[in-house]
Image: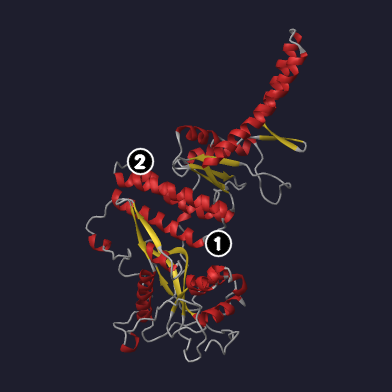
Amino acid sequence: MTTQTPPTSGIAQQLRPFRRQPQRWERKRSRVVHGGHVCCGSGCADGCEPVLIRERTGWGWIDWTVPADRSLPEQPHRIAVFTPIATRSQRLGLRWLARRPAHRIRLGPVTLRAATVVVTALTGVAATLAYLHGVPFSIVLPAAALAPLLVEHLTDRLDARASENVRIVEAEAACRYLQRLAALHTGLVEAALGSDRYEVRRAVQVGHHQLFDTADLLQRRDTRSASSELITRERLMLQLAVQTSRIVTPMKGNASSDRQDRLGRQQPLGPYPPQPRRQPQPSADHTTPATTREETHMPQDSPEQPTRDVYLLFAHEAYYPTPAQEINTSLVAAASLLHPHVRQPDGARIYDHLARGRRQGEIVPLSTLTHELDGGALWPEVGDWAAVTADLLQLIQDRECDGLSLGLPDIARALVCSGPHSEVRVYDPAAERYQAYGPADRIEVLAEVGRQLAWAEAGCALWPGDGLLVPANPGEAK
C-alpha cells in the first residue's frame, strides 16, 4: 500500500530563470560575476545584499539571485505581479517600476544610487563652469544641491506611486508557493501565443487575476493561516492549465478517458494500491464503505464506540511515482499518529483528539479537525499538524506503515481541504460563471474514498506500524 519516493520534485521546477532564453541568463550572470560582488552566504559581511537579476514578464517580474557555484537558483528571491486591470497610465508606471534594479554605491553609512553619484559629479562640474562664467553663486548653489536630491527622491516617489498597482512577495515560503502558480500561468501565456481561441485568452485573463489575488493574499497573511484558500486557488490554476492543454492539443482516440462526473472526478478516483493488495472481489464483510458522516458539532466521548479503525485523511504536496500518476492525498490509520518516528507528543495529542468519540471506520479529514479546533485557532495547543503530516507521509514512503495513496482531482481535493460546512466555487472560463460545491459533495468524495479503502483493506486492515506509543488518554479514546 505504500508508494516509492518519486524522482521528481514537483511542478515548481518548470519555472526557471529565462526558461525559453537560457543564453540571456548566462550573459546576465557573467556580467554580474565579472562586474560586481556575488553574495556567497556565510562568507559575506553583515547586511550584504544579494545581487539580483530581474526577469520581466507580461504579468510582472521575477528577481533571481546569482549562486556563487554557477548553478541555477532553485527559487526566486522576489516575485511581483501587476494588477490585471491597470489603465494606460498605470501600465506606464508599472513598466517604470519593472526596470532593472538600481545599482547602489555605499559611501560610509549611506548607500546612494549610481545615477545620483554621477549626477552629483556632473552637477559639480557644471556649477563650477557656470560660476566661472559669471552666474551668481546664489543661483549656482541651490541648483547644484537640488539636482542630486531630485534624482534620489523623485525616483522613490515614482516607485511608491507605481507600487500601489503591484503586489510583491519576498518571504521564502510565499515565494515558493507563488512560484508554482507562476509556472502554471506561464504555461497559459505560452499556450495563448499560438492560439486564437477565446477560451485560451480568457483562461490567461482568469489566471492573471488568480495570480494577483494570491500575491495580495500572501502579502497580508502567511502560507499556513491561508492554506485552504491557497490550495483552492492552486487547484483552479491547475484546472485552467489542464483545460487549456486539452483545447490547444486535443487528445485523439481517447474520449473515454475524459468522462467525468459532476465533481470532475476521473474514474477511478485515485491510484489503487500495489498488486499484492488487489483481490478479485472483496468479501461480504468488507463491501460496506467506511462511515463518512460529518458531525455538526464537536464529537463527544463515547466509550461504546471502538476507535481502532478511525482513519486520518490529509492532503500534501503532489509527487509523481510515474510521469502520468499524481499522488496528492494520503489516508492512514489513526494509530499511525502514535508511531515513534512521528513528531511527539504532537502526534499523540492529535490522535487523542482524532479518536475521541468517532464512529467505527470513520474517515476524518485534517480539515475537519481544523474546523473542530475553532477554525485552527487551537492547533497550537494540540500540536504541529504540518510537521506531523510530513512525518506520516515519510512513513508511507519508507514503508514503515500502510497508507492509501490517492490522486484526487482538483475539485475533490479542494473539498477535502475545506471545512465540513465550507463551499468551493469553481470558475468556468468558457461559460463565464461560477459553480458551487458544498457539504453534500464533500461527503460524496469521502464516500468514494471509503469505497477505495474497503477494497484496499480486503483481507488485511491498514498496518499502522510497529513500536506504537501508548495513547495519552487511553480511557477516553476507547
Circle 2 crowding by C-alpha within 10 Å: few under 14, some 14–19, many from 20: few
Nearest to N terminus: mark 2 or mark 1: 2
Residue type highlighted by circle 1:
Ser
Q: Quadrant of residue 100?
A: top right
Q: Residue furthest front?
A: 297
Outermost residue to the top: 134
Name which residue type carries label 2.
Leu
Q: Tell me: residue 201, above or below residue 235.
A: above
Element at label 1: loop
Mark carried by residue 193? 2
Q: Quadrant of residue 346?
A: bottom right
The reply to whether discs 2 and 1 touch (Cβ–Cβ < 8 Å) is no
Q: Nearer the viewer, residue 208 or 397?
A: 208
In what element is the residue under mark 2? helix
Residue found 43% across the figure and 81% down from its top: 362
396 or 29, which is in the foreground?
396
The N terminus lies in which quarter of the figure? bottom left
Determine the CA span between mark 2 and mark 1. Answer: 36 Å
Compared with 367, 310 (above or below) is below
Q: Is residue 44 visible?
A: yes
Relative to residue 458, is residue 93 depicted above or below? above
Residue 136 image offset from top left, x and y in percent: 76, 11
- Give coordinates of residue 447: x percent, y percent: 36, 76
- Say whether residue 52 is left or right of residue 463: right
Q: Residue at x 37, y 87 (%)?
A: 459
* Image location of residue 307, percent across then percent down: 48, 86
Q: Nearer the viewer, residue 274 or 123?
A: 123
Let me know if residue 9 appears in the view.
Answer: no
Residue bearing mark 1: 225
